[in-house]
Amino acid sequence: MKICIIGTGYVGLVTGTCFAELGNQVICIDNDKQKISRLKAQIMPIYEPRLEELVKRNFKEKRLFFSPSIKEGIGFADVIFIAVGTPQGPNGEADLSYVEDVAKQIALNMSSYKLIVEKSTVPVETGEWVEHTIRVNNKRKVKFDVASNPEFLREGSAIEDFMHPDRIVLGVESKKAKDILIELYKPLNAPIVITDIKSAEIIKHASNSFLAMKISFINAISNICERVGADVVKVAEGMGLDRRIGRSFLEAGVGYGGSCFPKDIEAFIRISEKSGFDFELLKIVKKINDEQKNKFIKKIEDTLWILKNKTIGILGLSFKPGTDDMRSAPSIDIIRKLKEGGAKIKAFDPQAIEKAAAVIKGIKFCKDVYEVARGSDCLVIVTDWNEFKELDFDKIKSLLKQPIILDGRNIYEPERMKKEGFQYICIGRR
Ligand code: NAD
């Protein structure tokens, strides 16, 4: 098939590359001209495992193209995916101005049938607005369909998730749209949920909200565990083996961040309000998440007593391991608060330093864990990169001023860390 992806970010680039890998002809469009020129020169705008290899192969084999011209993309393809950003607007609602702009451009530039697919995460009823926008700008009365195909990939394992999804959700209102999308996704051999557009839109927001709820739930449990001396990791294991509950997303920590959960939860709260339903549960999910970060900062303060002129070594900056994405990363707020208290910060991340340097100023970025440890009063783990799981603890102890590790992701066993000679403070366990 001939496919156009509008918005070549984390989702658009992965989606376009994977569709090309499946044998389609794909053009990826972005209005960031520099991003497109760099992609044409095979320079990746993001870090994502295996992405570079797949982009290079499909570009070389002429299945994957890049262009800043939306007109060129629309002329080239029969199926157009909208994968632009839908960031949080000032009142918490999703800002859909990029989606509207793209819908208008599609209408103005199409001259034959197009299937326009929402890939971006959008509030319910956006499909209707996209259809409306295209219809009123479609002066030549060209035939088109709108469909919803929300994306569930996770940064850090995006290619793997795209190629082996748990399910594919198709919100369609015509047989033609349904047939095209089923054909496109056939090679993945994954379960397909076919529904109307509004239900598909809600599936995405409801799924993200449910996952965020699991994280806040276990974080709330971690608070009880800390108070009574229980172990949240064992509690999660005991709960998670129940197939009705499941083990994933029951990791207590400093809370969720990233480009999706915070904005999507906020947007879903607003959508519910607009529909006349007060989704109180989600408001609490958000509140627990915010508090969790602050409680961790308080633990650092309580451990070091005075922050002023102390040096704090931060391990991990990206919002989760496997990505360089810094959007709404908990590290940003944690570092800001510690700096406000007068602490000096040294930090290391295996992939995110370049992006972190653009949003976090006045700290020292280091080349590895050991440079962070040298002369620091404690180490603070914010992102659970695999690289941090096996370290030379003797060396770290000799480099730190005090043998203190505060672990916001529970990556070590407390018993082991005590044996290694550390004061080890983690989440919901001792
Ligand atoms: P992103 O910011 O990485 O990418 C968006 C891209 O769209 C940018 O490169 C931007 O320059 C481009 N763009 C904006 N307006 C444009 C226009 N008018 N024409 C052409 N290009 C334009 O965002 P992302 O993380 O890829 O997210 C995209 C959407 O997918 C969002 O709705 C997000 O919620 C959703 N989503 C993201 C993830 C994720 O893990 N990042 C997962 C599932 C769904």
Image: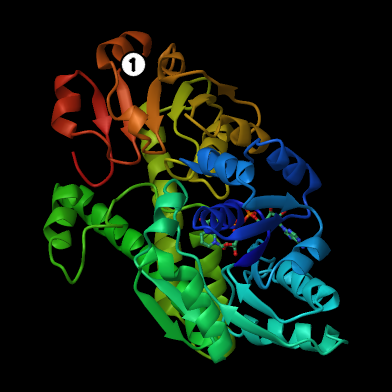
Task: Provide the residue designation for mark 1.
Answer: 402
| Residue 272 seen in render | no
Mark 1, residues whose alpha carbon is within 10 Å: few (<14), some, or many (≥20)? some
Numbered marks: total: 1
| Residue 238 seen in render | yes
Q: Quadrant of residue 92?
A: bottom right
**Quadrant of image for the N terminus:** bottom right
Please tell me which residue lies in front, 27 or 366.
27
* Residue at (15% x, 68% y) in the render: 243
Q: Residue flagged by tag 1: what amino acid is it?
A: Gln
* Residue at (13% x, 66% y) in the render: 242
State the image coordinates of residue 149 (x, y, percent, origin top left): 52, 73
Q: Quadrant of ligand 1?
A: bottom right
Please tell me which residue lies in front, 412 or 430.
412
* Residue at (80% x, 61% y) in the render: 72
Q: Is 114 drawn above or below residue 291 in the view shown? A: below
* Residue at (28% x, 15% y) in the render: 392
Query: In this image, 125 relative to 161: left or right?
Result: right
State the image coordinates of residue 114 (x, y, percent, origin top left): 70, 78
Q: Quadrant of residue 406?
A: top left
State the image coordinates of residue 228 (x, y, percent, origin top left): 15, 51
State the image coordinates of residue 198 (x, y, percent, origin top left): 53, 86
Q: Is 231 drawn above or below residue 280 in the view shown? A: above
Q: Quadrant of residue 389?
A: top left
